[in-house]
Amino acid sequence: MPLIAVLAGDGIGPEVTAEARRVLEALGLDLTFEEAPVGGAGYLASGMPLPPDTLALAKRADAVLFGAIGDPRFDALERRLRPEAALLGLRRELGLFANIRPATLFPGLEDASPLKPEVVANLDIVIVRELTGDVYFGEKGHRTTLEGLRQGYDHMSYDEREVERIAIVGFEMAKRRRRKLCSVDKANVLETSQLWREVVNEVSVSYPEVALTHMYVDNAAMQLVRRPSEFDVIVTGNLFGDILSDQASMCAGSIGMLPSASLSDWSGANGMYEPIHGSAPDIAGTGKANPCAAILSAAMLLRHSLADEASAQRIEAAVKAAIASGARTADLGGTLSTREMGDAVLRELV
Ligand code: NAI
Ligand code: MG
């Protein structure tokens, strides 16, 4: 029986995760759930944002359903004790190198995006972002130049193995969707990107059914607001993916609608699934949080970690139907509470 580790975390994390769990339970699958504290809740329970028991559970589980972390009460603590340290620890310990962020516009929410309704209509993109390499993890520091100027530096690099494994995730994803993969780099100026492009082309030989294109990151940023519906799957490095995935999320309207997956290989073993939003301390405890991002993350869990595409689609269809029927939390201009929005999705689950 698959084991799901439920790490609900802080703020609205427990509120939205409870709804995601209710939806998972309503599917009638044979799943077991085990909860553990993480983030500020972990710090309160054991003095550490990622308690050893929590990490052990995450490793033992078939998948992790993660809420959100972040608690302003702990902002003054040193970095390794702050809630955010738990997220980095989990990514590192579980080897989660592939971050997958779909940006879909659900019919009825065209007005929620800051872009024109006709631009975002039919938006259905997946951004596959490399998560454990690039300039964030290279050699970095501060030094003084020979002229006595202060200098900061961050070293950008990728080796071919790192590029290959993320490219495979991109191609596998595209294969299951509209079979278009756009690899984003800056190969006109960066050596890192030259190698990236070379390796992506090599991997493409194994995926003749997927149409591969390459695009420079500056152009991709432009195309994402000009004609976002042209994209199917985008695969890119950590830095470019960080920026482009936030940009793409705005095409889809509310942050409360967007799920994500972080994978350690294409098969999804040990995957971690979470809404892209944070703990939203400004609305925590008010029952205003939109649980859809968390519910859609549960759908991704079924798809990637449990290879249950049919159940994933059942959840996605239920969210779509609830939105189409007019169910709206405050972020979408409505009045439903977190629980009522969960009820609306459950009513549409068939
Ligand atoms: P946030 O995503 O928590 O909130 C940004 C804004 O969006 C807020 O106005 C919030 O009320 C709203 N919002 C977020 N999720 C919502 C939902 N489901 N329904 C309705 N409205 C929603 O980002 P913020 O405020 O920058 O960070 C708050 C805390 O969360 C910080 O401690 C930060 O470090 C942490 N954080 C954690 C993340 C994670 O756990 N993966 C990701 C981003 C931030
Ligand atoms: Mg970001």
Image: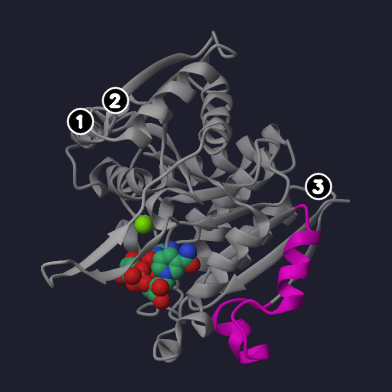
Q: Residue at x 71, y 69 (%)?
A: 55
Q: Are marks 1 and 2 in contact (CB under 8 Å)?
A: yes
Q: Which residues are magenta?
A: 37-62
- Residue 277, labelled with which disc? none
Characterize the magenta stretch by its predominant secondary structure.
helix
In the image, taking residue 3 as reference, residue 160 lies left or right, namely: left
Q: How is the image coloured?
A: one colour
Query: Which residue occupies the extreme top position in the image?
Result: 208
**Snapshot quadrant of residue 60:** bottom right
Tell me which residue sits at (36%, 46%) in the image: 245
Q: Nearer the viewer, residue 92 or 138?
A: 138
Camera-nearest label, 3 or 1: 1
Q: Residue at position x 26%, y 49% from top?
A: 112
Residue denoted by label 1:
219
Identify residue type, mark 3.
Answer: Leu
Q: Quadrant of residue 153?
A: bottom left
- Look at label 2 and name its amino acid: Met
Quadrant in the picture for residue 106: top left
| Viewer-nearest of discs 2 and 3 | 2
Q: Measure the alpha-carbon separation of dots 2 and 3.
A: 42 Å
Residue at image mark 3: 29
User: Which residue type does callout 1 highlight?
Assistant: Asn
Q: Is residue 206 above or below residue 124?
A: above
Which residue, given by chain and number where applicable, does mark 2 sit on? Answer: 215
